[in-house]
Image (cartoon, rainbow, N blue to C red):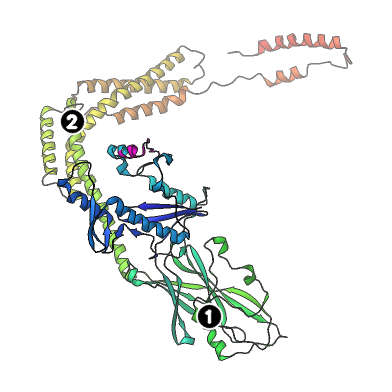
Amino acid sequence: MSVVGIDLGFQSCYVAVARAGGIETIANEYSDRCTPLAACTGGGEVELVRAVTLAIWGTRTGWSPPFRAEVPVKYMEEERSFTTEQVTAMLLSKLKETAESVLKKPVVDCVVSLKKEDIYAVEIVGGATRIPAVKEKISKFFGKEISTTLNADEAVTRGCALQCAILSPAFKVREFSITDVVPYPISLRWNSPAEEGSSDCEVFSKNHAAPFSKVLTFYRKEPFTLEAYYSSPQDLPYPDPAIAQFSVQKVTPQSDGSSSKVKVKVRVNVHGIFSVSSASLVEVHKFEENEEPMETDQNAKEEEKMQVDQEEPHVEEQQQQTPAENKAESEEMETSQAGSKDKKMDQPPQAKKAKVKTSTVDLPIENQLLWQIDREMLNLYIENEGKMIMQDKLEKERNDAKNAVEEYVYEMRDKLSGEYEKFVSEDDRNNFTLKLEDTENWLYEDGEDQPKQVYVDKLAELKNLGQPIKMRFQESEERPKLFEELGKQIQQYMKVISSFKNKEDQYDHLDAADMVKVEKSTNEAMEWMNNKLNLQNKQSLTMDPVVKAKEIEAKIKELTSICSPIISKPKPKVEPPKEEQKNAEQNGPVDGQGDNPGPQAAEQGTDTAVPSDSDKKLPEMDID
């Protein structure tokens, strides 16, 4: 069972057949899968869309809903008018015949003939289906709620993604078979000494299935060249039909001087690219006990012929040669299916059948691709592209410099009347604001199209006026926080100094000379901070600050590097004397007394020994 789908586009139509194995877009009688959206009435083709459009708009002033548009044509030597339904029926009938010619069976049960009740669901795609009036008409016609589960704009893209998933080995999807074709016929041309000239053969006809491979057989004594070209140059969009030249190297005659059998594999891959993928030489090894075959003039002429082996399917696993051709085996005279009738000739009769062994040797192939654009022109285009890329880069940098000037003008003009207002005098603010307005006007007049360096210089000129104001604002924000941090450090070190003078146990291990150094550094830092604070409080905000944030950070770092290592010195650990520990370990019976003491005696001895040791150790230990 097969299903036929017909796509009626704006200018062309397509017919697809879904059957066992997948979906295939079929071709019409002109070997073209694209059929024009036209109907022939005997007096020439009538473009359906244009005719219907003219019929509707040509009678626009005379109709009122409901209207019936008609197409005036000359049919059977008479002027007649057909409705859009009749013209559409003519087109569908032709497309139906196209499908039947491929299927070899009649197409019945057309969807168009279904009743509305037989339709389960209606799915609409396309950007125009978003129009409410279109949705309403479709829903009203079918009497059902229309479905919009598919993205109207991305339906085709999703189909492309499905095709990519089918081709990708990383995904496993339901099996679909989509067969592509070769759009233009491809032929091979080669020099034929036997025919005293060149020979050619069409290896892939128009609309041939792709990807596909073929094996061609040649009989040669020396290297030869194959020239691939499109055999229908009038249909090409390119000026030159040549594709490439493929030179088969290292071809040698047989040991008896006869021509060697060379098998050349040509292929059109999934992308439609033609190539000679491989070539192999068949070496013949004859047995000594058998008689050699007789050579005739007819045999010598046949050696220059080309034979086309049975076509191989496009599945990769089936493209390889049969194992029998690669193994050494005995074989008799070989015949192949010729590409054309005049190129297939019978081998000459032999006096006696000779058993031979064959082996294959891979031959190198040199490819010489014929570009549609010569190398000099291609290099010129590459150079021009590089120049355009550089020009785009320079233009972007120029625009960025111009935008930087514009952004700075807007930023400073807003902040001068906002957060920067207290940090600039009134005269300086008025002058700077006037400068910003002049720059803005210049950008939209004379400065509309200036080199990059002009904008860079203009921005530097503005920053010379605005940067001091911005610096005073930033210093006023950072300075109080740093002064507060410095004050906390000073208070911490003063507290440690006070604890050391009071001889607290936590700091009594510190050296007195080091603590004098800490006290001196702390007093100097406190004096410096108080001095700077007093001077800064007297300074106006419109003037540069007396002390900057970097100076305060340096003072904090200096004070910390001096005081922190001293006050964080760990307290030394106190250990008991080693001699007393040894005496305690050797406490036990002396001069054999107390040998083999009983359990009770041992326990009593242990109980009395503990307090006696403690009494001895306590007076001798120094406890902090």
Position of 578 relative to 462 (above/below): above
Residue 401: percent from the left, percent from the top?
22, 45
Q: Main secondary structure of the magenta part?
A: loop
Q: Quadrant of the C terminus?
A: top right
Q: Which secondary structure, mark 2?
A: helix
Q: Is residue 355 left or right of residue 260?
A: right
- What whole-number distance in Å separates the C-alpha atoms at marks 1 and 2? 92 Å
| Nearer-the-camera pick, 606 or 351 | 351
* Residue picked out by circle 2: 414
Q: Residue at x 37, y 52 (%)?
A: 7
Instruction: Specify whether residue 162 is painted magenta.
Output: no
Q: Is residue 54 left or right of residue 168?
A: left
Instruction: Specify whether residue 143 is painted magenta.
Output: yes
Looking at the image, is mark 1 or mark 2 nearer the viewer?
1
Q: Residue at x 11, y 45 (%)?
A: 445
How packed mark 1 is, by other alpha carbons closer than 10 Å (few <14, some 14-19, many 20 or more), is some
| Nearer-the-camera pick, 38 or 372 | 38
How packed mark 2 is, by other alpha carbons closer than 10 Å (few <14, some 14-19, many 20 or more), is some
Q: Which contiguous range is marked in magenta?
A: 137-151
* Residue picked out by circle 1: 344
Residue 361: percent from the left, percent from the top?
59, 74
